Image (spheres, grey):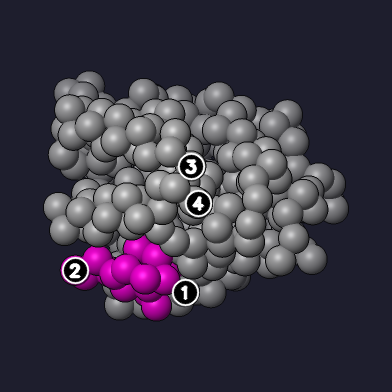
Amino acid sequence: MRPDRTAELALLLEVAGTPKPGNVDRHRDLADLRFEHFLAGAVGARDGLEMAADGAPVGPAFEHAIEGMAEQDGGNTQFGALLVLVPLVRAARDGDVPTRSAATAVVEGTTVADAAAFYCAFDHVDVFVGDPPADMEPLDVRRGSDAIPVLEERGLTLYDVMDRSVPGDDVAREWVRGFERSFAAAKRLADAEGSILDRAAAVFLSLLAERPDTLVAARHGKDVAAEVTDRASMLHERDALEVGRPAIEEFADELVDRGINPGTTADLTAAGLFIALERETVEI
């Protein structure tokens, strides 16, 4: 299977896994974001993922994927996931098994033009981001393409932009840390038991249990993010798919009711699924 199709499948499998506390899955919708929006978003991103698989630069491929993703009525479904997946797909374009070194080479080779395309992606869909530091206000991504002149004046590549987004954004952290947690998620998926959807849910919980979700921290504060991680850790220790399953279902419903959405953790789960599928360490 071409890596762009594998990435599309990974997006579909990620949203279908359940329970994933606080996130949309096949049993849960959010107030303004439903399961079918994610299905449509994954399919809509197909052309941009295909561009990456065919060797297009990361920035334009990502922008095109976001433009297609945003054609459904729910808004932002997989912005962060695509920001991780596009360079991974680009790294696997020649039929190679994706590696951390190959993915790192892709992101370190990005250009100012890639960064400009990344900013243009924010013109297509509303994405929640926290307020930037004062010195970064001219480069606030919420300005979209209006920030490009400043970006070009400073000569910042897309990798530079990601580097300046750490530590507040764990998707950006993947770019500058060699996709560390994405590859760890892929290994956990391979080592887990059960169907691929059960594995995806279990790995999501394991990722949430080890590190506070940066989207939760940005929206609700670091204390809430830490609380969610502490509770996920306790549930993960109780065996996600057996003894602890009813408690995880209850936790999932509670987070939805509270409007707490660990979206970054879902992004990394999707990336892990892509890597595991490409390496054929999981089966469907």
The residue lying toward the viewer, choosing from 134 and 248, is 248
Q: Residues within 10 Å of mark 1 (few under 14, many from 20)?
A: many
Q: Which residue is mark 3?
A: 239
* Amino acid beneath label 2: Ala
Q: CA distance from mark 4 to mark 1?
A: 25 Å
- SS class of the residue under badge 2? loop
Q: Which residue is mark 4?
A: 241
Q: Which residue is mark 1?
A: 39
Q: CA distance from mark 1 to mark 3?
A: 29 Å
* Residue drawn at point x = 54 percent, y = 67 percent: 12
Q: Position of residue 245 (x, y in %)?
A: 41, 53
Q: Position of residue 152 (x, y in %)?
A: 42, 35
Disc nearer the start of the sequence (2/4)? 2
Disc nearer the start of the sequence (4/1)? 1
* Residue drawn at point x = 59 percent, y = 70 percent: 47
Residue 213 in the image: above or below residue 133: below
* Residue drawn at point x = 20 percent, y = 28 percent: 222
- SS class of the residue under badge 1? helix
Q: Is residue 25 magenta?
A: yes
Q: CA distance from mark 4 to mark 3?
A: 6 Å
- SS class of the residue under badge 3? loop
Q: Residues within 10 Å of mark 4 (few under 14, many from 20)?
A: some
Q: CA distance from mark 2 to mark 4?
A: 27 Å
Q: CA distance from mark 2 to mark 3?
A: 29 Å
Numbered mark located on residue 31 in the image: 2
Overall secondary structure of the magenta section? loop
Q: Nearer the viewer, mark 2 or mark 4?
A: 4
